[in-house]
Image (tube, rainbow, N blue to C red):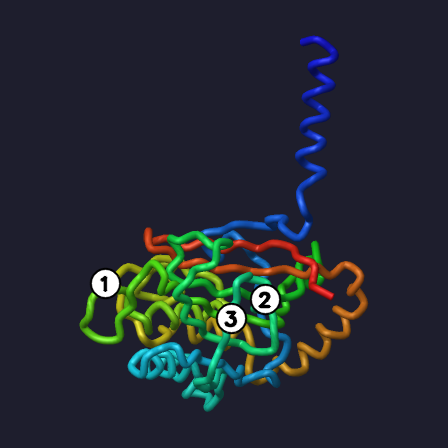
Amino acid sequence: MRLELKLAILSLLFFNFSCSPPQEEAVRTTASASAYDAPSKWASISQFPLNMKISNQFEDAEIDALNNTVDNWNDTENDFNYLSAQTTELSNKSKLDAYNDNVMGIYKLSTWPNELPPTALAVTQIFGTKKNVGKSNEYIKIEHADILINYDYYTFKTGEDWGYDLETVVLHELGHLLGLYHNDTSSDESVMYPTISRYTLKTFPLEADILNLQDKYSLQAQADSFRVNQAMDAIDEAYDEKVIVIHEIRADGTEKTKIKKYSPRG
């Protein structure tokens, strides 16, 4: 190969890599929790219950279904509430990063964002900080999250109508919002199984889901351990990475989790 041609190819490769915007860097794409070991979690149990806002664009029967999913994630055995809900007016955004505000919402979107594939039934978008980067105790500290439901391309049901069961879809997405990844052992063992079809009906977390949450937030000893973690985190703040985690449940029966770096506005 002539020297001039080699130099041209090298220049082209350098241009392609150097022009990739860092805020769009894909950190990891997975189909199951086992492929990504760093957990996502809220920083402290003092943040619970997370106050979810349900868009008043949903119909009454849909709002009842969404309230059921919120209630069903709460740990009645330990008398502990992870979530609460309130119906209110929510403004749908034209850009995904605009959802990083002070309102954690469940949104009904009749116009699906161009940034998301039309095959996505629903998306849980999480904004957070990757702590202890590169260490064995690396994790993503969740700072904000929303659930977006794709009414632009799909029909959702709350009874015997045709469509995807709304409670089943949102129950799964709320699991992501609480920090759970996929459990691909069996759909009979976890509502976090990475496949949902029109025939899937699961309205309550299963035993594996409840145990995973209890383990993640360790309701008895967690407060002390998080104080220690936060003290250690503060030492390594210079190495923190701001990330967006996007869980997409898709109409083709699969789900993808995308993790990418981003630069906060302002």
Real-space Cα distance between discs 1 and 3? 25 Å
**Chain-order first, disc 1 or disc 3:** 3
- Please name the amino acid that badge 1 sits on: Tyr
Measured as percent of width and height from the top left, residue 144 is found at 59, 72
Query: Which residue is found at the position 42% from the left and 87% from the top?
Result: 77
**Chain-order first, disc 1 or disc 2:** 2
Measured as percent of width and height from the top left, residue 129 is found at 67, 65
Secondary element at tag 2:
helix
Nearer to me, 194 or 77: 194
Secondary element at tag 1:
loop
Q: Sort mark 2 into few (<14), some (14-19) or many (20+) by Cα contacts within 10 Å.
A: few
Mark in the foreground, 1 or 3: 3
Query: Label 1: which residue?
Result: 199
Q: Are marks 2 and 3 in contact (CB under 8 Å)?
A: no
Measured as percent of width and height from the top left, residue 37 is found at 56, 57
- Please name the amino acid that badge 2 sits on: Ala
Query: Label 3: which residue?
Result: 146
Query: Label 2: which residue?
Result: 98
